[in-house]
Image (spheres, rainbow, N blue to C red):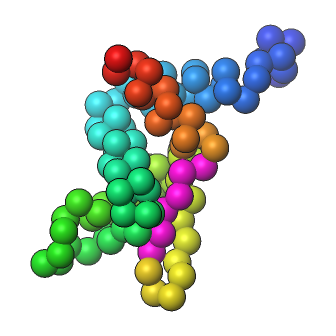
Amino acid sequence: ITQIEQSQTTEQKWEEEFIQFSKKPTNKELLSQAELIVYKFNGVYRTQRGDASEENYINPQALSVLDIAGIIQLTTESGRKYMALTGKGRHFVKLSHEKSQ
């Protein structure tokens, strides 16, 4: 670890990670999808398509990308699946809004 790396704040590291993450257009879509699920559906998501609204459907591969990147945290409560943004995930959403303006 270099001196520069040690002096970076967590948010600076996340900003660099966001730049790398955003280079893949599908990742931008995944972040938007996670934001929609968290804020419109209170984090409730589905991994199987059904007759109900498809807006809170997310495929398992997308979940793994977001989870492995540390953007979301997954939980299950009373049989319902929930997604929450981590601190890093909230920062990524903030950066995506700033970059889109």
Using the image, determine if residue 44 lies above or below residue 4: below
Q: Total of numbered circles in the picture?
A: 0
Quarter of the view holding residue 55? bottom left
Q: Provide residue 17's location: percent of width, then percent of height.
A: 56, 28
Q: Provide residue 76's location: percent of width, then percent of height.
A: 52, 78
Using the image, determine if residue 10 lies above or below residue 55: above
Side of 76 where 97 appears, left or right: left
The residue shown at (40%, 47%) is 35
Judged by its main secondary structure, the magenta piece is: strand
> Which residue is situated farthest in the left direction here?
51
Image quadrant for the C terminus?
top left
Side of 67 where 52 appears, left or right: left
Using the image, determine if residue 21 lies above or below residue 55: above
Q: Which residues are magenta?
A: 81-86
Q: Is residue 84 magenta?
A: yes
Residue 15 visible in the displayed image: yes
The residue shown at (80%, 11%) is 4
Question: In the depicted view, which residue is nearer to us: 101 or 10?
Answer: 101
The residue shown at (41%, 53%) is 39
Side of 33 where 89 appears, left or right: right
The residue shown at (34%, 30%) is 24
> Which residue is situated farthest in the top direction here?
4
Using the image, determine if residue 63 lies above or below residue 93: below
